[in-house]
Image (cartoon, helix red, strand yellow):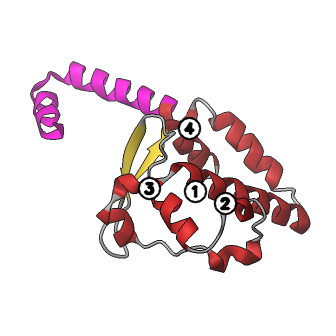
Amino acid sequence: MPGKLDGIYAASPLWLQQMAITSYGIVWKRRRFGGCFPRAVQEFTEREMFSPDHWVEHQTTELRRLVIHAQRSVPHYNQTLLRSGIAAPAMGLLTLADLPLLPLLTKEMIRDNPNAFVSQNSPRLHDYATSGTTGTPLTVKFSTAMQQRWAGRL
């Protein structure tokens, strides 16, 4: 499809090309910096003032939230977390010191079965490719809200 769109774009008059690029830019800006982006920036700014103890508390809370979510709704983690010996109730008690207990993830695992890493609760997702500067590029999937939160940290 991109090849076909490229051909239509190239054959279009300059004014239409400019309108298309402007429209694309507006959509991209809204997708990246709209929605939850302002709130994400505010949260990142607030965390700049965290004490070391507050950081550990925040990271521990987020670790538990993420692991519980992954086990409940992401097929790969539903299988591998339980196989790792971490029972579901214990996931709510994890600490940062427990990180070595979690199963390692490789790029090959994602490449072999990318859909196994998508939450069953996911909204519409967009594909993003890494640059591949350290090897083969990897395509990851982001929701619009995740992209906005990610952009907020920059």
Tell me the mark number nearer the camera, choosing from 2 and 3.
2
- Tell me which segment is drawn in magenta: 1-30
Q: Quadrant of the N terminus?
A: top left
Three-letter amino acid code of the residue under disc 1: Gln
Name the residue beneath numbered marker 3. Answer: 117
Residue at mark 2 to residue at mark 1: CA–CA distance? 8 Å
Q: Is residue 89 above or below residue 153?
A: below
Q: Secondary structure at mark 2?
A: helix
Residue 64 among magenta residues: no
Q: Residue 52 versus residue 124: which sits nearer the camera?
A: 124
Residue at mark 4 to residue at mark 1: CA–CA distance? 21 Å
Dominant SS in magenta:
helix
Q: Earlier in the sequence, mark 3 or mark 1?
A: 1
Tell me the mark number nearer the camera, choosing from 4 and 1.
1
Q: Earlier in the sequence, mark 4 or mark 2?
A: 2
Three-letter amino acid code of the residue under disc 3: Phe
Q: Secondary structure at mark 4?
A: helix
Whole-percent x, y for residue 87 in the image: 66, 66
Whole-percent x, y for residue 122 in the image: 49, 39
What's the mark number on residue 125? none
Q: Earlier in the sequence, mark 2 or mark 3?
A: 2
Residue 10 among magenta residues: yes
Residue at mark 3 to residue at mark 4: CA–CA distance? 17 Å
Q: Name the residue at 57% across, 66% down.
A: 82
Q: Is residue 68 above or below residue 146?
A: below
Seen in the image, is 42 located left or right of residue 51?
Answer: left
Three-letter amino acid code of the residue under disc 4: Ala
